[in-house]
Image (tube, helix red, strand yellow):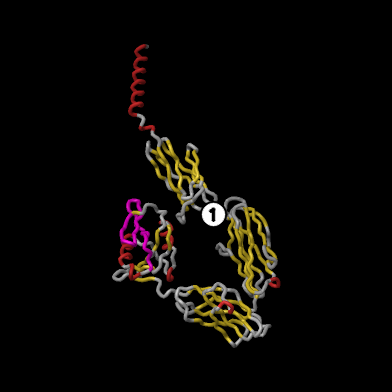
Amino acid sequence: MKKTFSILTAVFVVLTFFVSCGGSESSEPGLIYGVVTDKVIGEAVKNAGVELLPVGLKTVTGSDGSFEFLDIAAGHYNLLVTKTGYNDTKSSTITVESGKSARVDVPLEKALAALRIIDDEGNDISELDFGAKLDDVSRSFIIFNDSSDLLDWKITKTAEWIKSVSEESGELKADEKRGIIVVIDRSLLREGENLSQLHITSNNGNKQLAIKATNSDVVTLDATNIRTTSATLNGELIVNDEGYTETGFVYGGMATPSFDNNAKTVSNSAVKLGNFGNAVSGLKDYAKYYYRAYAKNDTKTVYGETKSFVTLRASEYVTVPGTNLVVAKEDAGKVGRDSAVSLCKNSTLAGFTDWYLPTEEELVTVYNNKDSIGSFEDFVYWSSTVDNGKYRVVDFRSGVTYNASSLYNHYFVRCVRAAK
């Protein structure tokens, strides 16, 4: 009995000696830190809640999206990040080693509201435009519950000339749709353009649907034959009870062109009911122009609604000499790495749909020809190349290539495609 006690005592003494002399390092706390960002645009998300699991420690991100947990025992953890308007996000397993720091950046994805306002083809819409036609008094839209929960909704009108909506409130089951008919009273419209809103509220998202209508004897139609320096403006005279002696268009760079703000004009002296059009030239390439149809007599001028168009660019891309590499002549934006890929992938510049983010090698070629291509910023550009998990970039101030410190950095994007 005494022998057993002596052995146990000896073991205890040895263990105690080991812990006091060599085991202190194993108990040294670690640190977890990182940044919470918007997954799409890469911007910092402030005031997001960050919980350390399974210990339950909580903190909130600062204005730069940063957070940290100090004095964390070595072990395995997860982060649960929450923010209103975003999906709750749980990180992958984080291993904290004794006395070391672990960085974990967490991208948040915005939550989609259950309430959607769509058209017959399922496209999200934000406007119903009744135009100026006298018999155009009824339009429709669809309320869609894009969730698995019950949706309670309500519609509020904001103008007397919105005569009625077919339903003002209701419930929608998961994935259910409800068609709504809007009727306006044109006798209550003021002269010119009229704009109001339908407020559509629910227990899972709110929307505003713009309602537009024009009270005028003349209608502005879409421009056609749009070129780099010219276009054809179109309109329609629907009533001529006032004895109009001239029709035409006012146009320019101002948002609401008129005879009173030095807009340019083009006119017709031969007036008749129905459609009319005028070609305009001398425009700038790749410029936005606003225009309105008008009709006038000796005492008054009436206008149609304002429309706009953008002239074509004289040259939207260039082929690098000696290669089949086609380069856009303008940057697509300044964004994070994931958005950079999407910007090029979704580009329809000059009618092409095969644009992509250049490789590091291609981007160096672009840099070497930047003076002839033009319009580059003296800053860093994203490439599509990944090297050992690092995203490669090219500095257009020097041509130096290197690894980006984070895929959330905002760098410039120049899209390319292969010549066919």
Question: Badge 1: few (under 14), some or many (20 or more) residues near its Cα, within 10 Å?
Answer: some
**Residue linked to disc 1:** 112
Q: Position of residue 268 (x, y in %)?
A: 57, 86
> Is residue 362 positioned above or below 263 on the image?
above
Along the horizontal axis of the image, is 105 left or right of 207?
left
Numbered range of the magenta stretch: 375-402
Residue type at numbered disc 1? Leu
The question of residue 220 being in magenta is answered with no
Residue at 36% x, 30% y: name it.
Answer: 24
Q: Position of residue 115 (x, y in %)?
A: 59, 56
Along the horizontal axis of the image, is 113 left or right of 313?
right
Residue located farthest toward the left when viewing the structure as drawn: 322
Residue toward you, 379 or 225: 379
User: Is residue 175 visible to the viewer in this orientation of the structure?
Assistant: no
Residue toward you, 225 or 411: 411
Q: Position of residue 91 (x, y in %)?
A: 45, 45
Q: Position of residue 176 (x, y in %)?
A: 61, 56
Give the position of the C terminus as an image quadrant.
Answer: bottom left
Residue located farthest toward the front when viewing the structure as drawn: 261
Residue at 35% x, 58% y: name it.
Answer: 393
The question of residue 397 being in magenta is answered with yes
- On the image, which quarter does residue 241 sit in? bottom right
Along the horizontal axis of the image, is 12 left or right of 256?
left
User: Is residue 116 visible to the viewer in this orientation of the structure?
Assistant: yes
Residue located farthest toward the top when viewing the structure as drawn: 2
Give the position of the N terminus as an image quadrant.
Answer: top left
Secondary structure beneath label 1? loop
> Is residue 29 positioned above or below 360 on the image?
above
> Is residue 234 positioned above or below 102 on the image?
below
Residue toward you, 356 or 61: 61
> Is residue 278 positioned above or below 144 on the image?
below
